[in-house]
Amino acid sequence: MRTLFYCKLFLFLGLLWPGPTLAAAEPYLTAPAAILMEVNNGQVLYELQARQEREPASTTKIMTAILALELGQLDMPVRVSEYAATTPGTTIYLTIGETLKLSELIKGALINSGNDAATAIAEGLAGSESTFAWLMNRKARQLGAYNTSFKNPHGLTEAGHYTSAYDLAIMTRYALRNPFFSKTVATKEAQISAPDGIRFLYNTNRLLDSYPGCDGVKTGTTDAAGQCLVASATRGGRQLLSVVLGSSERYSDSCALLDYGFENFYAEMALAGENCGQVYVNGGETAAVAVAPETTVSFTVPKEEAALLEKRLILPAAVNAPVKEGQQLGEVVILYKGQEVVSSALIATGEVRTLPWWSRLLMFASRGL
């Protein structure tokens, strides 16, 4: 409750005294570097020195988890070395020689922010921290994170270890596509194995308890980095992603950013798999088939421009049976100021088989044909 109070307080103060360089509608932040991004479409809604190279602290573990999920198997056993067990900083108290599943170490790194868990992941997948860091940097470049240089898998201060708010946003947006990642970062408490029974994990992200719709992502704190937080929240199908680095009040900063995005912008959306129309089927066992977007598409504008958006379904009047599930039958298009900005195929959500010939004959006969 105290966190929510400070969120509201700082937002209130920001509206009263936004400072000489901020527009009245913009959020008040203590962080020197920040960004707000729409997860569905990657649009940047707000940024402040978002390309500036800064220390990321434990938000580094977002990339560690990405590689773990892509290079390993969740049930893969990982043996903990002495080096991993003695990694300084935040820990899940791994012991030398114990073996855990990779999935448990990912949870330990993301939920409890265990530096020892991150090191064990790196050694288990790449043999050493340095080799794993090379893989982290290669993946970062592939995702378009060009202001990033990782030297370790956990984020402890090290020369040449840095990223930017923008890079963290695009890495996290990518990571959130993975169901295991998105479920883990939204988990408040979890249990994993321990030599003497069970380890209890508690999420370090306080917004999960205080901000409506919060569903992730990762905290980070060191003396050099200050308070860092990558946070996400979903409301009405919209998922927003905020990043604050070097903050003095990371939770209130994140609240202000997320509130700014939800309150001041509108997104026209078509969600993947969500029925949005139907097409009549000639000669089919059923008269029509529902259609849904193959992929989620959306476009975001300031609320005062919402009337300039239009969602248009392009569908045939009818199609002939048979229809296969997943078959493209049309297209959904989002237009802004009359111009197409994004589109997705509309696919059949089910199968429609052709009526047997005798059924069609009886149907024609009943019509007097």
Image (cartoon, rainbow, N blue to C red):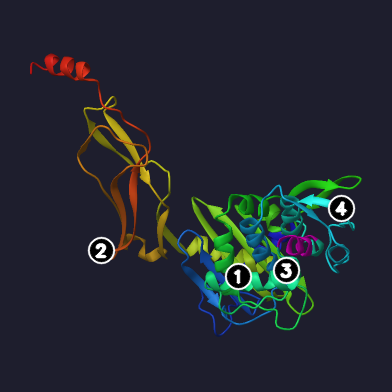
1 or 3: tag closer to the N-terminus: 3
Q: CA distance from mark 2 to mark 1?
A: 33 Å
2 or 1: tag closer to the N-terminus: 1
4 or 3: tag closer to the N-terminus: 4
Dot 4 lies on which element? loop
3 or 2: tag closer to the N-terminus: 3
Picture quarter with the N terminus: bottom right
Q: Quadrant of residue 30?
A: bottom right
Q: Are marks 3 and 2 in contact (CB under 8 Å)?
A: no
Q: CA distance from mark 4 to mark 1?
A: 32 Å
Query: Residue 98 bears which disc, if any?
Result: 4
Dot 2 lies on which element? loop
The location of residue 235, given as percent across then percent down, is 53, 52
The location of residue 360, given as percent across then percent down, is 19, 20
Which label lies toward us, 3 or 2? 3
The location of residue 140, given as percent across then percent down, is 58, 71
Which label lies toward us, 4 or 1? 4
Q: Is residue 22 magenta?
A: no
Q: Is residue 187 left or right of residue 139?
A: right
4 or 1: tag closer to the N-terminus: 4
Q: Is residue 308 left or right of residue 85?
A: left
Which label lies toward us, 1 or 3? 3
Disc 3 marks a residue whose amino acid type is Pro
Report the residue marked by disc 3: 153
Q: CA distance from mark 1 to mark 3?
A: 14 Å
Query: Residue 168 bears which disc, if any?
Result: 1
Q: Which residues are magenta?
A: 117-125
Q: Residue at x 20, y 16 (%)?
A: 358
Which label lies toward us, 2 or 4? 4
